[in-house]
Structures are given as C-alpha cells and as structure tokens.
Image: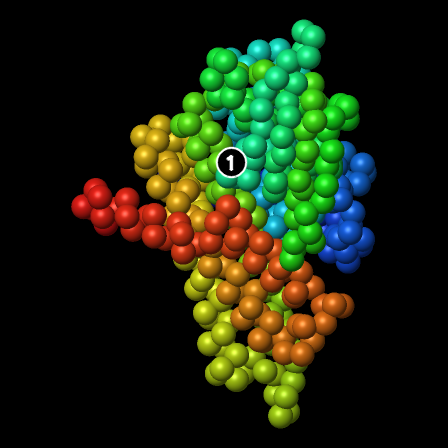
C-alpha cells in the first residue's frame, strides 16, 4: 500500500478540483441546489462525465477508466471538499461496484455501465441499509414485479435505474427497476444535510429485471465499498473546513492581533488537523484493501476501522465553528454546510461507536491488536 499519490492520481485530483471550483462552487452551484431533489444540473453532470470521473470505476471495455477504489477515493475527497450535492457516490461508486461484485450479470449490466461512464445513466443502489427495506417479488403476466418500500435510498430522484435486493424462488437477487416505470414512487426524506439527497421508494407492482443472484458476502462487500468512499468524501469536507478556519484565524483580529496567535485557537486547529490526518491513514488503507487480494474478513475489518475513526470527523466541523465564532453560525457562511455534511457522514449506516465496538470485538476474538 502506497500512502503517496502517483503522478496520475495527482493529475486526477487537480483536474477534479479545478472543475469543481470553476463549474460547481459552493456559492454558485451547491447553495442553489440545496432544495433540489436531484442535486445536480445537466451541465455539471455532463462535465463530470467528460472528465471521466463518472466512469472512474467502470471497466475500460464498457467505456470507463477502469481505475481502482484509490482513484475513486481521490475524486470523492475533492467532491466532499466542494460539498458536491450530486449523485456521484451512488452512480459512480455504489452501482459499478455492485455490478462488478455480482459478476457475469450479462448485457443488461453492460448497458448500465456504459451509460454510467458516458453520463447518460444515473444509477443508485437501494440495499445499503437492508433493515429499512421490505420488498416482495411477484409476477404479472410474463413480467417480474416488485412490491414494497425501501427507506433511505440515496439519490433516487436523480436516478434512472435502481438496483434492488429481493428474494424469489431462486434466492436473494439484485433486480433492476427503472424509476420512470409505473408503480415507482419516490418520496424525499429530509435530513440535516441538504447536500445529501435521500428518499423513500415505494414499489407497487413495478416491473423489474432479475440481474443476478447476490450472496451475503457480495452485499456486505458492496456496502463496505460505499462506506469507505463516503469516508473519503468526509475527509475532503473536513480538510476544506479546516482550511477555511485557519485562513480566518490568520486575518480575524481581536485585541489588536490575529486570533491565530492565541494559544487556545492554535490548540483547536492542531486538534482538527490531528483528527483529519489520523482518519486519512485509515481511509487510504480501506480504499486499498477494497481491491487488494485479501481475505474478506481483512477487507471488511479495514472498512469497519475507517468508519469507526473517520466517523469522528464531525468533531472537526464543530471545532471549526468555535474558531469562527458568531459568523460560523450564520446562513451566509459555509461552515454550517460542512458541519452538516460531516454530521450526516457520522450517522451514515450507523454511528461510529457501533463500528468501534465491532472492531474491538473482532480483534478480541482473534487475540490480535
């Protein structure tokens, strides 16, 4: 595992960062879409596709870049730093990784991957939180239909395609549902973070196509992939809000001097930096482990660690607002948007404490720390 970015990864990072600064800034793009259910515009999504970042994990034979989770993490960190509200994590990470881990999903999967890579298809995975789903498989004429409800589906309003987990006579499988089909209703679920779009999807006899069988190990691996990519996003958000706080501390003056000269402020900035950098090593390791030829237990443990420790990045947003003081609480300042992004990450698929307890239990079972 290499903790330093290669020249190609640096170029990917810089290109993505420049595009977001020029075409999708917080002031001009993000704030305008806080109440928009899709979280993106055709121009910005097309721009991301033209850069190749929507197809970063799509194999080359399907028109993608064929890169690894490390490169996806590089992009995710930049999107997090820019508070990007679009469906990139769902369409460019969750869906391609689900299709890749299913293996042999056929022509339908190939068509989805081609569309993801060129930006004409937005897909989302609707089985990240299986405890909030209840879907039954039925038949109508010669068609397979799904009935039930799924809560907490990310980016469903922007998506053309849903990947749904359900059980039929052949066992647990992943089904493709087109969101414009009859019987599909998407209802927004409002949360603290307006840059993350989540929905309840109601399926009332919606036509579906059985893509492939999905073992518990495959489902778990897909969830881990999304978890570590989301951790990289949070890492970017935390890095960006630290930069804002440090720059503010350099020029904000009290008692005739910059507040950054006060020891109390310096300690706060050091605490934020330490939290981010400790999380960074775990996130990089988990991204590497997602593609490495490791036992599934080791890969899963790396993802658990990333969530357990990077989940505490919300404290960075909270501390940054202490540095900003009163202005940090205002709607006009971006600090509260970063705090909300980090809070939503902290609670994503469970609190960090739950993951920390699981990491401890697994290590205790192995007798190895």
Q: Locate residue 28, reporting x and y percent.
A: 80, 54
Q: Locate residue 122, reporting x and y percent.
A: 70, 30
Question: How is the model colour-coded?
Answer: rainbow
- Examine the rendered structure and indicate whether residue 369 appears above or below residue 65: below
Quarter of the image where the N terminus is located: top left
The residue located at (51%, 71%) in the rendering is 269
Left or right of residue 284, residue 134 in this image: right
Mark 1, secondary structure of its residue: helix
The residue located at (45%, 69%) in the rendering is 271
Q: How many marks?
A: 1
Between residue 166 and residue 18, name the one nearer to us: 166
Left or right of residue 147, residue 365 in this image: left
The residue located at (61%, 83%) in the rendering is 258
Between residue 229 and residue 297, name the one nearer to us: 297
- Examine the rendered structure and indicate whether residue 145 appears above or below residue 220: above
Q: Quick one: label 1, few (<14), some, or many (20+) residues within 10 Å?
A: some
Farthest residue, direction left? 367
The residue located at (39%, 50%) in the rendering is 355
Residue 357 visible in the picture:
yes
Between residue 355 and residue 9, name the one nearer to us: 355
Farthest residue, direction top? 142
Q: Locate residue 248, reporting x and y percent.
A: 64, 73
In the picture, residue 158 is in which quadrant? top right
Left or right of residue 156, residue 298 in this image: left
Between residue 2 and residue 319, name the one nearer to us: 319
Residue 10 visible in the picture:
no
Residue identified by numbered label 1: 130
């Amino acid at each position: 595992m290499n903790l330093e970015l290669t020249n190609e990864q640096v170029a990917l990072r810089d290109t993505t960062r420049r595009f977001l600064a020029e075409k999708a800034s917080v002031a001009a793009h993000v704030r305008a879409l806080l109440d928009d259910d899709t979280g993106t515009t055709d121009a910005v999504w097309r721009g991301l596709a033209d850069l190749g970042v929507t197809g970063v994990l799509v194999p080359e034979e399907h028109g993608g870049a064929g890169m690894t989770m490390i490169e996806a993490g590089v992009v995710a960190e930049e999107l997090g730093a820019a508070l990007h509200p679009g469906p990139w994590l769902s369409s460019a990470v969750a869906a391609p990784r689900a299709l890749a881990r299913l293996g042999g999903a056929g022509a339908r999967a190939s068509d989805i991957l081609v569309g993801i890579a060129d930006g004409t298809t937005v897909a989302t995975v609707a089985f990240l939180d299986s405890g909030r789903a209840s879907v039954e498989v039925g038949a109508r004429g010669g068609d397979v239909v799904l009935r039930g409800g799924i809560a907490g589906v990310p980016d469903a309003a922007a998506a053309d395609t849903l990947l749904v987990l359900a059980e039929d006579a052949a066992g647990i499988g992943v089904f493709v549902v087109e969101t414009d089909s009859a019987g599909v209703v998407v209802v927004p679920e409002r949360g603290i973070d307006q840059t993350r779009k989540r929905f309840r999807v109601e399926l009332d006899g919606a036509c579906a196509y059985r893509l492939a069988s999905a073992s518990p190990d495959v489902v778990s691996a897909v969830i881990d992939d999304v978890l570590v990519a989301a951790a990289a996003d949070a890492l970017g958000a935390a890095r960006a809000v630290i930069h804002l706080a440090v720059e503010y501390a350099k020029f904000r003056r009290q008692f005739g001097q910059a507040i950054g000269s006060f020891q109390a402020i310096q300690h706060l900035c050091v605490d934020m930096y330490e939290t981010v950098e400790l999380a960074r090593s775990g996130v990089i390791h988990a991204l590497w482990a997602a593609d490495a030829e490791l036992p599934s237990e080791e890969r899963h443990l790396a993802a658990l660690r990333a969530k357990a420790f990077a989940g505490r990045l919300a404290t960075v947003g909270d501390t940054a607002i202490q540095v900003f003081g009163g202005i940090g609480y205002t709607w006009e300042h971006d600090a509260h948007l970063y705090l909300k992004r980090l809070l939503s990450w902290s609670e994503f698929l469970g609190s960090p404490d739950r993951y920390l307890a699981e990491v401890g239990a697994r290590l205790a079972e192995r007798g190895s720390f």
